[in-house]
Image (tube, rainbow, N blue to C red):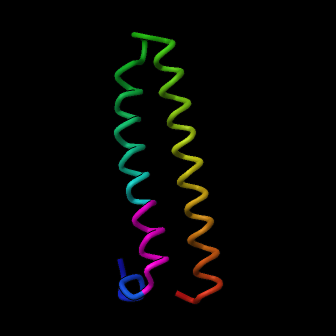
Amino acid sequence: MDLTAHYCSTRRSLEERSRILINLLSGVTSRLIGLVGIDHKKFNAIRDECSGIKAEIAATRRRLNKHREEHGC
């Protein structure tokens, strides 16, 4: 986090949300890998969960970019 983010609570919040989501995706991906060839139904459910998290990451990134453009931080 740079100095600007330290003073901008919105940017800090969005960057923190991204960090949390990326850590969550890492854990869910590990679970997904563990299910390969073992339980197809659970694998599909976890794969869908990964897709949802990736979509949230993308949406958060878009909000962060929009915020940066609007506020210059």
Please say if 20 is above or below 26: below
Tell me where the magenta segment starts and ends, as one range. 8-17
Q: Name the magenta segment's main secondary structure.
A: helix
Please say if 24 is above or below 31: below
Q: Residue furthest front?
A: 9
Q: Quadrant of residue 59?
A: bottom right
Residue 67 image offset from top left, x and y in percent: 60, 78
Residue positioned 54% across, 46% down in the render: 54
Residue positioned 38% across, 26% down in the render: 33
Q: Is residue 40 left or right of residue 71?
A: left
Please say if 11 is above or below 52: below
Residue positioned 56% across, 64% down in the render: 61
Q: Is residue 9 magenta?
A: yes
Residue 39 image offset from top left, x and y in percent: 43, 11
In the rendered image, the quadrant that contains the N terminus is bottom left
Residue 20 image offset from top left, x and y in percent: 38, 55
Please say if 48 is above or below 64: above
Residue 13 image offset from top left, x and y in percent: 44, 70
Q: Nearer the viewer, residue 9 or 60?
A: 9
Number of marks in the rendered image: 0
